[in-house]
Each structure stands twice: as C-alpha cells, then as structure tokens.
Image: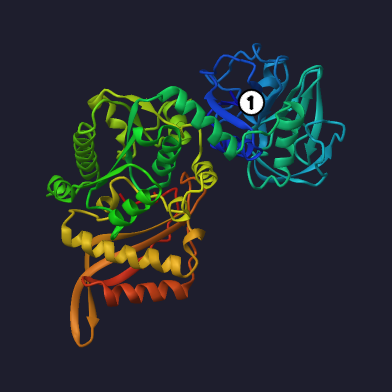
Amino acid sequence: MEETILILDFGSQYTQLIARRVRELNVYCEIYPYNKSPEINEHIKGVILSGSPYSVRGEGVPNPDLSGIRKKLPILGVCYGAQLMAMQDGGDVAPSAVREYGRAELTYINTGSELMKGMSTGSQVWMSHGDTILDIPENFEVITSTHDVKVAGYKVQGEDTYGIQFHPEVYHSTEGTILLKNYVVDICKCSQSWTPDSFVETTIALLKKTLGDDKVVLGLSGGVDSSVAAILLHHAIGSSLHCIFVDNGLLRKNEFKKVLDSYQGMGLNVTGVDSKERFYDALSGLSEPEDKRKAIGRTFIEVFDEEAHKIKDVEWLAQGTIYPDVIESISVKGPSATIKSHHNVGGLPDVMKLKIIEPLNSLFKDEVRRIGKALEMPQNILSRHPFPGPGLGIRIIGKVTEEKIRILQDVDDLFIEGLKNNGLYDDVWQALAVLLPVQTVGVMGDERTYENVVVLRAVGSTDGMTADWAHLPYEFLAKVSNDIINRVKGVNRVVYDISSKPPSTIEWE
C-alpha cells in the first residue's frame, strides 16, 4: 500500500481541495468522514483535520475523541480542526468580533517552526471562520499571527500536532503549498513516490492479481474516465476485457464512428451497438428532465445487459467511477439530496449479478488525465470535455425528436470545431449547445422566418463542482453565431449563457 495522508472531514467546502494539494506533492491522500475513520495502520503517515461549516461551540457538532491519534501521528488541524483541538485541551474559542473571511497577511512567523519553514512575513493567507482561538492551553505555542488573529497557527509542545486558522489549500494563500509540503514531507516523512507511472504499475499488477483469467465487461462512453479504465484493464488482462459502446442516438455528430475507430486503434476489444431507434422510442412524448433521464438510463441498462449476456462466462463489471463519486457516497453529511438522476451503469449490478471492479475510484478527474497520459493514450480522448450520459437528450429542452437532434448535432459540431480551430477548446472545461423550445422571428434574405433559438455555453472549472462562464472572444462568438445561423436549417437566433455555477448548473437539465 501507498504512504497515505488521511483527511478527517468535518464538512468543509475545501476538503477535496486539501486532498488535491497533497496529491500534487506526489503523496497519496484519502478523505473520510470524521466519524467513519479507518483503523490507523503503518501506511498512514499523518492526519489532517478539515474545516467545517459548524461552530465548535455549538450543540451536537462534530467532537470526536482524538486520543487514538494524538502523539502517535503528526496532526494538522485546519480552521475548525485547529479550534477543536484547542478547545478540547482547555483553550478559549469564541465568536470572532468580526467574521474573518478573505485575505489576511502573516505578521509574525516563528522561523524555528518546522511547519512554517520557508514562509515569509507578509505572506497572504485566506481566512474563513466565524470563531477565533482567543487563548491557547499552556502547552501550546503560537507559531504565526495575522494583524487581527494572534493565534493564526500553533504547535502543541511534545507532539507533532499543529493547528492553523487559515486555509493553505486555496489559491489565495500564496505560500500555502510551502506549508503543506513542510507538513507532508518534512513532518510526516512522506517520500513523494505516488506518481502517475507508479499508479499505473501498481494498479495493473493489482488488476492482474484480482482478475486472473476472468472475463470483464465494461461500458465505454467515449469519455476520459471509462477510456482510461479500459486501457488499464487492457494492459492487465488483454482480450479478457470486453467493451461495449452503445450508440443511443444522442451523441455528438458522427461521434459513434469516430470514437469506435479511436478505440479499435488502441487495440481494445470493442463491440459497437446501434440502438438509436430504441432510445428514440423510449423518449417519445417525454418532456420532463427526470423522465427523460430515467428513460435513457433504463434503456441503456436493457441494451447493455442484453449485449453483455452474449459474452459467455463474464465474472466482472468494470466501471469508470472516480474519487469524487466515492466521497459523495460516504459524505459526513450523507449523500447529497439528488438534484438530478445521473445516467450511470451503476444500476447494472442488480440486474447482472456481477462483481464490480473500479480501477480509478481513488483518482480525481485531472489525475485520471495524467494516468491516461502516462499510458500514452491519444490526446483527443484525454482532452475531451465532460459529456453527460443522457447526451443531447438533456440539451434539448422539452420533447426530443430526430429533427431536433439533427439541429442540435449540427449546432454543437460548429461550436466545438470552432473552439478547436481557434485554439480555445483546451482553455474551456466544458462547452455545449442547448436547443430551446422557443421560436423567434427573423429575416433571411427577403423572407420572414420563425425558427429555433439555440444557447451556447462554455465554462471554466477544475472539477465541475463550481464553474464560471468562459469569457470567449467576441470575434469568435460573432463568427460561430453567424456560421450556425447560415448553415443550420431551423435556427435563426444564437445566445450565449453567462451564468455561473452556483447558482446555475453547467447543464440546463
């Protein structure tokens, strides 16, 4: 097993970001709810206590017994985690006179502190807390302060236990990476050996040992996650992997053939299934987003199940599940309330009674791309924007028809190819087009038209959890709008979506 930094999550919005920053130091990191932590073993080198939306002074708030790890492993408490340890040891934590949120500067640094080594007085940090540690226990020492917060950081004497009231993981803490490296490498003694190449080597060996000569079936989507999972499995078990790529008729223009060709060029054993008409029949008459998602998901499961049963003696179902999905399922707050149903082959095991293998379930999306690069996969697959399982079915607002799919495929193709041709595609996290159930008046030549409105949307993000609308050049938007109106029959108006997530979502349905 890898050397691991364990994060105990108290519900902070920044917890996943801490994990990402630690992993960027080539050290493996896992997140667990504070009340579901694993048994401490020799592979765990340190424990980070996250922030929280709660106040340590409230009733019924997280207050775990830390005696099992104190003095045994290095601990770093961040914000709530720091306040919790200070309060448990008899310190005074009180509501801040003014809620401390935003940028601050370190006005004092104990240069002898191992945690603060290499950091600068005046360094900018990011505060986000409603409580403040006013007094610390006698065996605590202050290692850093800001103008307004005397105990911005502390060390417990006789222990490798530290607490800080700012967030080193966020971009606005300009020397946050230095602090995290001090903790992970110098204090926890991690060797920084968790690299894409080491992950590939370890994972392929584990897959070989786990699967042996068993047959595995995997549903490919054309996306990054399922594609990287497929190549890892292919390296491990070769032709024992059977991939199924279903054309639901809701893919991008000509995508079924393009992606199928790409997969076969990589040597994968792939069966392409044209089920367009079956999906169109299932969607007939449906207009509500949830109804459409469920119809698409149900039909996919039926098609996939039928195709998988044509392969004799399959033992395993492989999935491209990634780490944020795992975290979500064991969240300290419980799984989030469903905003929308996701089309995922996770519904298949109940039908197929197969064992599950998920080679990517410890990785974030950007890490999956790095693994794919280490596997020398084609860049056009690794750089592919996220694409929803229900495809264009949820980008056509209202009822789905073949004519609407034709229109949206043509619009989407002009938009995406335009981004690629103008060197903008890789600057955008996700780009899409939406067909509205709205017609507007227009003039083409000497004729009055009454045709459809399409929306173009492009966003920037790192993980899709939050996103800002992409500030694409006006000249590009003008050209692509003109191309769409002139070349796509049935469209006479193009608009650009400038809403961010939150409060909006990236997809419209």
Quarter residue 30 falls in: top right
Compared to residue 476, the image places residue 265 above or below, namely above
At label 1, which amino acid type do we have?
A: Glu
Instruction: Decide which of 394, 102 is in the foreground and name it.
Output: 394
Question: Who's the residue at 60% across and 31% down the image?
Answer: 28
- Is residue 331 visible from the viewing direction of this image? no
Counting from the top left corner in percent of width and height, residue 375 is at 51, 44
* Nearest the eye: 376 or 293: 376
Tell me residue 150's x, y (percent). Answer: 78, 34
Few, some or many residues within 10 Å of mark 1 (<14, 14–19, 20+): many
| Number of numbered labels in the structure image | 1
The scheme the figure's colours follow is rainbow
Q: Position of residue 417 (x, y in %)?
A: 39, 66
In the figure, is residue 378 to the left or right of 307? Answer: right
Which SS class for mark 1? loop
Quadrant in the picture for the N terminus: top right
Is 453 displayed left or right of 480 in the figure? Answer: left
Q: Position of residue 138 (x, y in %)?
A: 82, 17
Q: Is residue 444 left or right of residue 79?
A: left
Residue at the image position 24 percent from the left and 78 percent from the top: 442
Q: Is residue 143 visible?
A: yes
Most foreground residue, 222 or 315: 315
Farthest residue, direction bottom: 446
* Residue at horizontal 22 percent and vertical 59 percent from the top: 405
Question: Which residue, given by chain and number where applicable, does mark 1 sit on?
Answer: 3
Vertical comparison of 369 with 158: above or below: below
State the image quarter where residue 149 is shown: top right
